[in-house]
Image: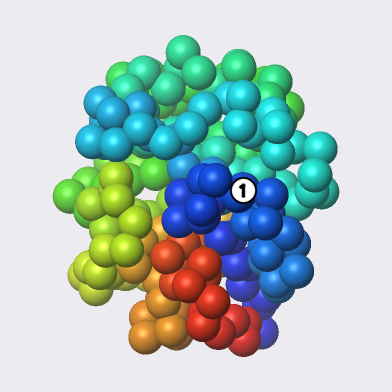
Amino acid sequence: MKKVVLAPSLLSADFFDLSSALKKIESSPAGIVHIDVMDGQFVPQISYGQPVVKSLRPHTALPFDVHLMVEKPESMVDSFAQAGADMITFHLESTVHADRLAHHIKDLGKKAGVSIVPSTPVSLLSELLGVVDLVLVMTVNPGFGGQKLIPSCLEKVRELSRIRSGRGLDFLISVDGGVNNGTVSSVVDSGADIVVSGSAFFSGDFEWKY
């Protein structure tokens, strides 16, 4: 049975005490720190940027997946790579030259991820699946923590799993949005390799058994 990786999202942490949030992640079964960067344009809110990533980097050996929920992510990947990102995930909907951007991220020595919002079909990823290291399926409309998972989005995870097997590819499938004790089993069962949890994880009663 494959091992599924837990990736807590700092978006739901107490921004006043990110040090304690990082310690909580470190003491959990988590294997990745998920860092949501929001610009107030692609999504309504603004979160944090490169200085925060740089400040956190020396305090954990866990890999950072920087999820760029921003317009024109190509203008930011170099600086986030320098700040300490290990993986950089951009949105298919936010850039025209997605193939170029994915290759550039990999040229920087980082893992390249691409994300899709609930209204974007998997078919639009076809030309990228042989390039990227990770596909992030958003199971909520991005921009706010604490939303309810949209169950129909899990069919995208199953579809990606079938495509990966059929084409002999090796990208990882990540799921982000509304993952809690009531939904995590369905997310894992759908074929996710990485499970992002924010509000539920930091609430203190999230159970992880995968």
- Report the side of 60 relative to 161 (left or right): right
From the viewer's perspective, is residue 20 above or below residue 202?
A: above
The crowd level at tag 1 (other Cα within 10 Å; few <14, some 14-19, many 20+) is some
Q: Position of residue 17 (x, y in %)?
A: 60, 49
Could one spot residue 115 in this view of the protein? yes
Could one spot residue 169 in this view of the protein? no
From the viewer's perspective, is residue 42 above or below residue 191?
A: above
Task: Identify which residue, 50 or 142, lies in the foreground.
Answer: 50
Image point (79%, 48%), residue name: 60
Image point (48%, 65%), residue name: 197
Task: Identify which residue, 177 or 17, lies in the foreground.
Answer: 17
- Circle 1 residue: 18
Image point (23%, 52%), residue name: 141
- Report the side of 148 relative to 48 (left or right): left
Q: Position of residue 14 (x, y in %)?
A: 51, 53
State which quarter of the image contains the C terminus. bottom right
State how the image is colored: rainbow
- Quarter of the image holding residue 27? bottom right
- Report the side of 5 relative to 59 (left or right): left
Q: Secondary structure at mark 1?
A: helix
Residue type for callout 1: Leu
Image point (58%, 25%), residue name: 50
Task: Identify which residue, 176 or 130, lies in the foreground.
Answer: 176
Q: Position of residue 74 (x, y in %)?
A: 46, 17
State which quarter of the image contains the N terminus. bottom right
Q: Residue furthest top?
A: 75
- Report the side of 107 relative to 157 (left or right): right
Q: Position of residue 188 (x, y in %)?
A: 48, 77
